[in-house]
Structures are given as C-alpha cells and as structure tokens.
Amino acid sequence: MSLHTQQNLWVHITSRLNSVGQWVPNLLIRIILFWEFYEAGVQKLNGENWFAGIQDNFPFPFNYIPADVSWFMAAWGEYIFAILLLLGLFTRFAAVSLLVITAVATAAVHWPESYSSLGQLWEGYRISSSDEGNFKLPLLFAILLMPLIFSGGGKFSLDHLLTHLTGGDATHPVTSDFISKGLGLIVVGLPLFFVMTTLGIALMAIGVVLIIADKFITPRG
C-alpha cells in the first residue's frame, strides 16, 4: 500500500470518526451525568436535610443562604438539570448550573480542610472520607461537564433539533478570537472560585479583560 493510499485511508477514517463524534460522545456523557445527578437529586428529595451541619463550609455567597433553601436548590437543581442533560435541552445552561452545584459541593464537603502545598492538596484526589479531601469524583464530573458547556449537547439532542427546525445553523465556525479565549477562562475560573477563590477570580478577571480587549485588538472585516 503506497504512502498516498495510506494517507487517503487515514483521512477517510478520521473524517468518519469526526462525523460520528458529533453524535455519540456528548450523548454518552449526557447519559452518565444524567444518572449521577438525577440519583443524587432523588436521594435529596426523599431524604432529610443535612446541610445545616455543614452550613459554615459553604463558600460565599451560599453560606448566607438558609440551609433549607440551599437543600431545596441543590435537590431540585440536580433533579431538573439532570433531566435537561438527558434530553439535550438547554444543555449549556444545565451544564453550567450543575458545574456550579458541583463546585459548591466540592468546597463544602470534598475539599481538604487545609493544605500547605500542591502535593498535599493532591492527596485529596481520592474517593474516600478523610480530612485530606476526596474531590476525585466531583472533579471528574466537572471535567465531563466541560465538553457540554463548550460544544453543547451534540447532534443527538433536542437543542440540535430545535435549532434545525427554527432554521438556525447548528454548526458554527470555530473562532480563535479574544472573546472565545475569555469565555474559556471564565468557564474554568467559575468553579475554581468556590474552592480556590483567588485563582478563580484571577482567571475570570483575565477572561473579562480579553473579552473587552477583543473590541480593540481583533481586526474587523
């Protein structure tokens, strides 16, 4: 088989994988996240409120919200946004909302009580119950939510169907301007704000600066 033939075969395979990639990966992510958050929401709706015991651990501004209200928001948030993920309806909004819920839960329950170095912080990357933290699972949830925030629910979703029915373009060109970079930093900085406040604020502030700078730096056609 010649080099040219091998290259054509590789291009053919990758193009098919790219096509399938618009349907399958985000669907699988949505299904697994639906089950995890839906199950957590149902358990809260059918269980007793234990937030009062960790009220002081909630990050600002949630530490000022009454425990009953926080419990209601968390339970119904996990329940409703999980269903939206499964349907692929308002996917980005649901994913961002669940990212915030995950970040707040991490800060209140899963984050280490104290740490003096990144090495000590990394000891909390586990699934256990200890003062060193156990943020492995929520971190994985947060990472899985990122593709849904940045690329949406994929073609096998109600969002895609509604966009098609309303005459919108379901595929948008990939841009690399300062606005896209700024939005990326804001999305990453948002959950970090609740667990590493200074770093989260710094990333979101840089993101805002990039968005503002786009008006003055990016060439206009």
Image (cartoon, rainbow, N blue to C red):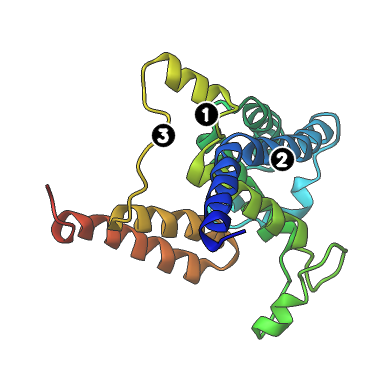
Q: Looking at numbered disc 2 in the image, what kind of residue is underneath it?
A: Leu
Question: Mark 3 Cα within 10 Å, few/some/many (few <14, many 20+)?
Answer: few
Return the x and y of residue 92 as percentages of the image width and height: 51, 37
Residue depicted at x 79% and y 74%:
132
**Residue 193 rendering spot, x and y as whole percentages:** 52, 61
Identify which amino acid the numbered label 1 is placed on: Phe
106 up-or-down from 92: above or below: below
Label 2: few (<14), some or many (≥20) within 10 Å? many
Nearest to the eye among marks 2 and 3: give it. Answer: 3
Q: Which mark is residue 171?
A: 3
- The quarter of the picture where residue 111 lies is bottom right
Sequence-wise, the earlier of marks 1 and 2 is 2
**Is residue 71 or residue 167 the one in the foreground?**
167
Of the two numbered discs 2 and 3 on the same chain, state the one appearing first in sequence: 2
Residue placed under numbered mark 1 in the picture: 90
Q: Residue at x 71, y 30 (%)?
A: 79
Q: CA distance from mark 3 to mark 1?
A: 16 Å
Looking at the figure, which quarter contains the N terminus? bottom right
Question: Circles 3 and 1: CB distance less than 8 Å?
Answer: no
> What residue does disc 2 label?
33
In the rendered image, residue 212, in percent from the top left (x then y), is placed at 23, 56
